[in-house]
Image: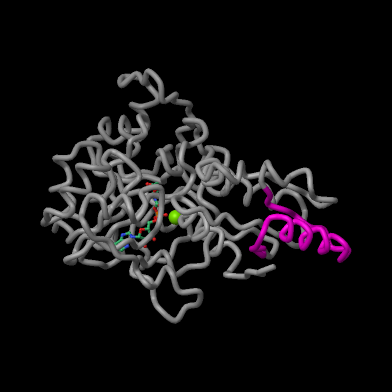
Amino acid sequence: MITDIVHIDEKGIDFDSKELEKAASIIQSGGLVAFPTETVYGLGADAKNEEASAKIYAAKGRPSDNPLIVHIADISKLNEAAKEVNEMAKKLADAFWPGPLTLVLPKHDDIPYATTGGLDTVAVRYPSHPVAMALIKKSDRLIAAPSANASGRPSPTLASHVLEDLDGRIPMIIDGGQVGIGIESTIVDCTGEVPVILRPGFITPKMVKDVCGECTIDPGIIANDSSVKPKAPGMKYRHYAPKAPLTIVEGPKEKVVSYINSQLLSGKKVGIIATDETLGNYTGGKIISVGSCDDERSVAHNLYGALRQMDGLDVEVIYSESFETPGLGEAVMNRLLKAAGHQIIKV
Ligand code: TXA
Ligand code: MG
């Protein structure tokens, strides 16, 4: 299969352009289209079409028990994805949609188990990216879309990342440039009394609490080992992993830098994930800055790209600084810890 790449700029989208027509017709006929969202690139298919969903799993090499997120571009469509929408979900949708938030609710009978990985619940998101919205509206379907990476690889934040993983496996990629946020949406389980965060993201626990009065975090995503099973099936997989083993070094910045510098003497080819502030303090190695330590958004924005870049640098071991900031830092560290297989050194 030849993978067609089309460019659609998020500014001034022409709803009748031939690119958008083509993408919508692929979705309508049960095919796959990769497209940008504000979080990461998604790999879309008609959510109500079992065969289309099955193609997503095949293209990504994704385990079949890992459910897909159903994307909508009109709040009224929420009732086509979910059977019941409680007050908690309505409040959260009202506060954060369109945006980087996914709600888990009881599934509508029309959503096949092939899309929900056999679960009776469905994850729903209303993305804010203009290209995503245009594609969903133009195809007039609910679009099931996981991140558009091969299973186990970092989520794509550029169309070229999608091509790297899925070239020849899907008919079309819509290139809308680099995505804004850079890490996947926050997932909130709305099926109980209290909202539960199943995956941390740009929408923080505090923001959820401010809207609902309460918010808890799934113990499965905090545990450092596999003793507690996460409730979002996808969170149990070792994800985002670069090819060389990654270790996070945590502690005061000077000590982190001097520890990593000492590892340069090992004779191995070392990759370093650093920040703008520390970049100049390393005495060797292949260094990539993910942004400023004072700007957690820049770190989220660049993290997956940096992990992918490391694979191209021919390094044998990778050390990363730690990014423990109060807001988005939690979501960033969740991804980094997974990429590192929870290997941390405290200095
Ligand atoms: O930002 C995002 O959410 C991106 C963009 C493309 O929208 N999508 C994304 O999808 O990250 P994916 O498939 O890579 O991650 C979906 C996560 C998985 O961890 C999956 O297990 C969880 O959502 N999930 C989906 N349906 C669920 C459900 N019914 N209950 C619990 N977790 C669910
Ligand atoms: Mg994913």
| Of the pair 129 and 248, the residue shown nearer to us | 248
Residue 255 in magenta? yes
Residue 250 position within the rendered picture, expressed as x and y whole percent measured from the top left = 64, 63
Furthest toward the bottom, the residue is 227
Please state the quadrant of the image where ligand 1 appears. Answer: bottom left
Q: Nearer the viewer, residue 258 or 271?
A: 258
**Who's the residue at 37% across and 67% down the image?**
233
85 in the magenta segment: no
Please name the residue shown 61% across and 58% down the image.
322
**In the rendered view, does 266 fall on the left or right side of 31?**
right
Residue beneath the point at 19% across and 42% down: 94
Q: Quarter of the image containing the C terminus?
A: bottom right
Q: Which residues are magenta?
A: 247-274
Residue drawn 36% across and 48% down? 203
Above or below for 43 versus 196: above
Q: Quadrant of residue 190?
A: bottom left
Quarter occupied by residue 96: top left
Q: Is residue 243 left or right of residue 37?
A: right
Work out whether residue 38 can be spotted. yes
